Amino acid sequence: MRLFFALWPGPALREQLAALGREARHRCGGRATPPDKLHLTLAFLGEASAPQADALAASTRERAIAPGTWTLSRIGHFPRAGGHFPRAGVVWAGGDAGAEALATLHDRLAALADDAGLGVRSPGAFTPHVTLLRRAGAPPEGWRPTPLDWHYRAAALVASTSRHGTHEYVTLARTRH
Ligand code: 2AM
């Protein structure tokens, strides 16, 4: 299984993100992320064995994170050309307000994973983003969506399994709050 740490939106924010995804799809085409799969990846850990996942789930439950707010205020794009699969043609929502705290969270959770013998597998710098579309075209220049505030208090350790070309996500543990 592949593991990652993520923030999962509550029902109200999920609906707002889903509405933004529908608007994005209208403008850029591609495939929208199903509402229950909308999330922010804090740290991608890659393949893990069951004992590694169990150990990391136990240490995740003992850990608390600093609560915070991230404001999603812009639409970004990982273009097809030169992009890394599975990121080619991704249209995402992101924002700078509160992003520094997310980078700190990324570092702390990466250290926790390190202690469990799992390194962070990332193609580059941490860019906090919520994937709205895949296989999509570039978003129109100057599109500024209505900002959305994401208040968070806990992070989730999630396992991703791939079946018949679709990804299933299962939450293994949450940080304390
Ligand atoms: P994405 O939405 O940009 O594709 C589960 O696959 C989560 O982990 C997704 O949010 C995905 O980000 C992210 N992910 C998948 N492969 C990754 C990688 N090599 N580096 C960083 N994040 C990755």
Image (cartoon, grey):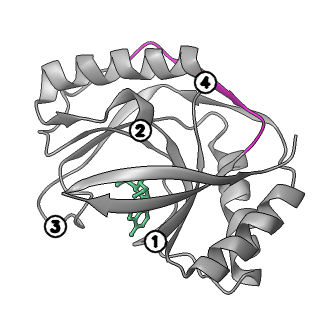
Residue stretch in magenta: 145-154
Q: Give ligand 1's quarter of the image.
A: bottom left
Residue 7 x %, y %: 61, 42
Residue 144 visible in this rendered orientation of the protein: no
Residue 38 x %, y %: 43, 36
**Mark 4 element type:** loop
Residue type pointed to by label 4: Gly
Q: Is residue 48 magenta?
A: no
Dot placed on the residue nearer the N-terminal end, 4 or 1: 1
As displayed, is residue 83 above or below residue 14?
Answer: below
Left or right of 56 in this view: 169: left
Q: Residue beneath label 4, please? A: 10
Q: Residue beneath label 1, please? A: 1
Q: Residue at x 73, y 57 (%)?
A: 104
As displayed, is residue 60 above or below residue 146?
Answer: below
Q: Are marks 4 and 1 in contact (CB under 8 Å)?
A: no
Of residues 130 and 103, the one drawn nearer to the viewer in this rendering: 130
Q: Residue beneath label 3, please? A: 82
Task: Say few, some or many: other residues with alpha carbon within 10 Å of mark 2 (under 14 / 14 to 19 / 20 or more).
Answer: some
Question: Where's the N terminus, which quadrant?
Answer: bottom left
